[in-house]
Image: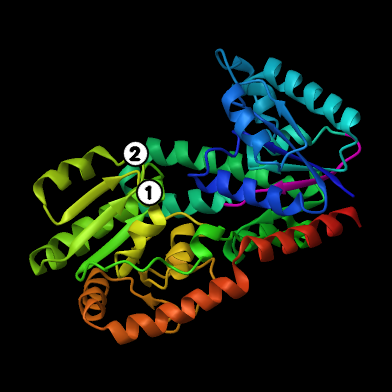
Amino acid sequence: MARILFVTARPPYPLHQGMALRVFHLAREASRCHEVHLAARGLDAGTAEALAASGVFAGLLPLPALAGPPARSRFLFPLGHHLLRRYAPDQYRRTVASLGAYVRQEGITHAVAVTLPMAEMIAPLAGPRKIVDEYDCASLTMERRLRQDGAALGARGRLRQRLALSRIRHQETRLARTCHLVTTISPADAAALSRLSGRLGERVRVLANGVGEEWLREPPAVREEERAVAFWGALDFEPNQRALRFFFDQVYRPFLAEAGITWHVMGKNPPAWLQAMAGHHPGLRLRGFVPDLVAEAARIPLAVNPMQSGSGLKNKVLEAFSLRRLVISSRLGMEAIEALPGEHYLPADSPQEMARLIRQHLDSCETRRRIGDAARRLVQERYTWERIGQRFLVLLQEAQA
């Protein structure tokens, strides 16, 4: 039996955000046959009690928070890979010492650092096999953002972004050197990390996301709203905000609003501009946080995924697939999911095509049903957390070899 320690920047609770869902479900699946522990910043008493009650974690280790002014030494080596050690040397030393003591005390065999900053924390650990879950390749996201925004940033802004990109690339280049495996969420992210890893690129593996049981139950029998589309997710997530802006400015306002089509937007922390627009457009229903998202999403016949930036896998798509919702998506928004256009979803990159497909298929129940059924089968076959967990267990064995 392995003893696995997940090391995260924040605890996987509550389960409303992508990182929390990923860590919790991977840990839960691993706990079925191994002993799983968690080390996290921000692990307060209430959160620790909720995680302990889940029965997933055999032990919890609070990590020191990054506090106080950053050290000036961070400017001496702007492209160095020891960023946290230079940014907050005291907290870095305390964290590494705490992790080292816990690894020895609990006999940890595998340390899984979630995201790039935490990879630096497990690098010095002696004993356990090390895995870094860089689920979204940070440099790929930044490269895409720089290509989109470069002209608007100005010379100084571009220089600042390129320096930040060089720093991230330097860190990601070293991941395969300092750990035994690197996991990421999509083939595009894996390809980018493999290129950066050079001859050690074979250490990079794809580990997708799954969907929870609440989405996999037979969808509730509710009356669908006839002419409505939905978007849901973390509304303060920058790629989601870009998608919302694109859809509102170029699809909803010019093509859908006057056609009487209602757009439901669900999620926490909506941007101020979207709140203002909701006050002027009665068809834009800004719902905020929805306690029973499954039931609400099941009422709306069509989901849109108009992603224009970022990388990684869009959980909202798998969730919509699970409910047999027809998804109309940009191709970028589908790059991480093994779905076939026309069979599991409908692709649309131009505003005109997206609007045309929405209007057409709100009036085509037969097509929605056919594609929705195929999409649900795809999730059941490939994207349950049970199947993703089995893949994770295989990767743990690979790291041991």
Q: Is 75 placed left or right of 157 in the picture?
A: right
* Magenta stretch in the rendered image: 126-136
Question: Residue placed at 68% from the left, 52% from the top?
Answer: 26
Viewer-closest of 353 and 200: 353
SS under mark 1: helix
Which part of the image, by quadrant, shows the C terminus? bottom right
User: Where 210 falls versus 47 (above or below)?
Assistant: below
SS under mark 2: loop
User: As shown in the figure, which amino acid type bears the numbered disc 2?
Assistant: Asn
The residue indicated by pointer 2 is 269
The x and y percentages for residue 310 are 46, 54
Viewer-closest of 32 and 303: 32
Q: Is 318 placed left or right of 274 in the picture?
A: right
Within 10 angstroms of label 1, few (less than 14), some, or many (20 or more) residues? some
- Sequence-wise first label, 2 or 1: 1
User: Where 137 falls versus 115 (above or below)?
Assistant: below
Question: Residue placed at 64% from the left, 18% from the top?
Answer: 73
Q: Is residue 397 magenta?
A: no
Residue 308 lies in quadrant: bottom left
User: Where 13 falls versus 291 (above or below)?
Assistant: above
Question: Residue placed at 43% from the left, 49% from the top?
Answer: 146
Q: Is 256 placed left or right of 167 in the picture?
A: left
User: As shown in the figure, which amino acid type bears the numbered disc 1?
Assistant: Gly
Viewer-closest of 121 and 145: 121
Tag of residue 150: 1
Specify the farthest residue to the front: 221
Question: Residue placed at 51% from the left, 65% from the top?
Answer: 217
The x and y percentages for residue 338 are 55, 74
The x and y percentages for residue 284 are 18, 54
